């Protein structure tokens, strides 16, 4: 069928508590910025990117969708996703002003909406449309208990609760505070609280230089750190390569890489061990699949980053054979018709036809912000 209308939206949804911080970001809301694509025969697909809810930035993305991308899709066949992806990504005036950043995030939202339409039309959840689930269970790990803004006392208690009461077999702890000794103290307290054998990942959010990262990997020996995520500035390929070769702790990254080409270079140089693509940062599901396949060909594990807060990644994680784990942050789940759900530490397999992106009317009423 064909595309009739594209309707952009901006939602600002509160995070757990009043705000959270990692070493680099502080936010009170998650921005869900995207569009609904309506077809002439009455289907609606939904896609979105994830932001830190800066209204001016969100308006730039929404406007790029509405004014620059939507006219290229007018009356197009929504089933031709690869062709439409190229039509937008290679549209000369658009690629001139951005092969990353705002234009890429706009394309991500559109691509996800197109896949949502395709899966709905097939009457299948996305994971089945792509080829079926390749493993009986996907293990989730909890990021929401590990923010740097959580006090030393509450951190270990929250991690213990997630493991002992909620059944999580993995947690991620934010580090990269100005005081490395404090980071190490907090990790030791968490390890003590959750016991041995529970996965404990760490995330620096791009804060350190190579010497600090190397020092951390030495001093954290004995804490059984599962990975060190984004230890260095996001684009520092040589630094990550040096660290990945020297470190006894595996290196994870990808949430700040915009393109399949960027991932290809990190993979080729051996600069990472866990590959963390994100449909909301890459240009949608189309480009995520490219990255996951490249990682798989290099025999590297794939663990999606939660820019979509897991709504789409739940499907991709059940489907893709290189996926080993799933990042869980529950901030926006209540907005969706088929919300991401973890039971006994395992990611529930989504059931609804589509890509998991259908937003409830109440969420629009409650969280929509003016487009400007
Ligand atoms: C909050 N997950 C992350 C959030 C998260 C960031 O700043 O955006 O911590 O994306 O690194 O692994
Ligand atoms: Mg991260």
Image (cartoon, rainbow, N blue to C red):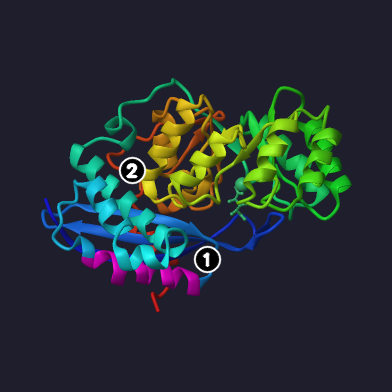
Question: Which stretch is magenta?
Answer: 56-71
Residue 108 in the image, given as x and y percentages of width and height: 38, 54
Q: Which is more toward the observer, 360 or 92?
A: 92
Q: Residue tagged by mark 1?
A: 53
Give the residue displayed 49% in from the left and 48% down from the top: 309
Residue at the bottom extreme of this rendering: 372
Q: Residue tagged by mark 2?
A: 355
Position of residue 299 in the picture relative to residue 19 (left or right):
left
Residue 218 in the image, given as x and y percentages of width and height: 84, 33
Residue 233 in the image, given as x and y percentages of width and height: 67, 52
N-terminal-most mark, 2 or 1: 1
Position of residue 50 in the picture relative to residue 230 (left or right):
left
Residue at the right extreme of this rendering: 181
Height in image: 49 above or below 82? below
Height in image: 59 above or below 231? below
Q: Main secondary structure of the magenta part?
A: helix
Residue 291 in the image, given as x and y percentages of width and height: 44, 38
Height in image: 35 above or below 220? below
| 10 Å crowding of disc 2: few (<14), some (14-19), many (20+) | many
Q: Is residue 366 visible?
A: no
| 10 Å crowding of disc 1: few (<14), some (14-19), many (20+) | many
Residue 92: quadrant of the picture: bottom left
Residue 356: quadrant of the picture: top left
Between marks 2 and 1, how big is the CA–CA gap? 23 Å
Give the residue displayed 46% in from the left and 27% down from the top: 296
Asked if the magenta segment contains residue 70, the reply would be: yes
């Amino acid at each position: 069928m064909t595309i009739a209308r594209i309707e952009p939206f901006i939602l600002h949804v509160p995070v757990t508590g009043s705000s959270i911080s990692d070493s680099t970001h502080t936010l009170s809301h998650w921005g869900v910025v995207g569009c609904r694509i309506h077809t002439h025969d009455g289907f609606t697909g939904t896609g979105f990117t994830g932001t830190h809810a800066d209204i001016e930035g969100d308006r730039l993305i929404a406007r790029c969708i509405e004014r620059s991308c939507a006219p290229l899709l007018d009356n197009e066949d929504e089933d031709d996703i690869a062709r439409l992806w190229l039509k937008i990504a290679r549209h000369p005036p658009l690629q001139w002003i951005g092969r990353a950043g705002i234009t890429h995030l706009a394309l991500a939202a559109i691509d996800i909406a197109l896949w949502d339409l395709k899966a709905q039309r097939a009457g299948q959840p996305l994971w089945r449309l792509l080829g079926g689930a390749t493993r009986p269970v996907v293990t989730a790990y909890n990021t929401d208990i590990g923010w740097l803004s959580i006090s030393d006392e509450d951190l270990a208690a929250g991690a213990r609760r997630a493991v002992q009461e909620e059944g999580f077999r993995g947690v991620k702890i934010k580090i990269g505070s100005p005081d490395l000794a404090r980071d190490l103290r907090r990790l030791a307290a968490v390890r003590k609280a959750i016991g041995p054998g529970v996965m404990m990942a760490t995330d620096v959010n791009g804060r350190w230089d190579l010497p600090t990262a190397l020092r951390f990997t030495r001093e954290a020996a004995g804490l059984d750190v599962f990975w060190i995520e984004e230890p260095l500035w996001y684009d520092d390929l040589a630094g990550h390569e040096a660290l990945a070769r020297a470190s006894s702790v595996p290196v994870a990254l990808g949430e700040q890489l915009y393109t399949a080409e960027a991932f290809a270079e990190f993979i080729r140089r051996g600069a990472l061990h866990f590959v963390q693509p994100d449909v909301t940062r890459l240009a949608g599901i189309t480009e995520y699949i490219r990255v996951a396949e490249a990682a798989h060909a290099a025999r590297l594990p794939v663990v999606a980053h939660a820019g979509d807060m897991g709504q789409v990644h739940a499907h991709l994680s059940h489907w893709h054979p290189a996926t080993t784990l799933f990042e869980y942050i529950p901030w926006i789940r209540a907005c969706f018709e088929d919300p991401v759900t973890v039971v006994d530490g395992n990611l529930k397999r989504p059931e609804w036809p589509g890509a998991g992106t259908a937003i409830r009317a109440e969420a629009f009423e409650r969280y929509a912000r003016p487009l400007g």
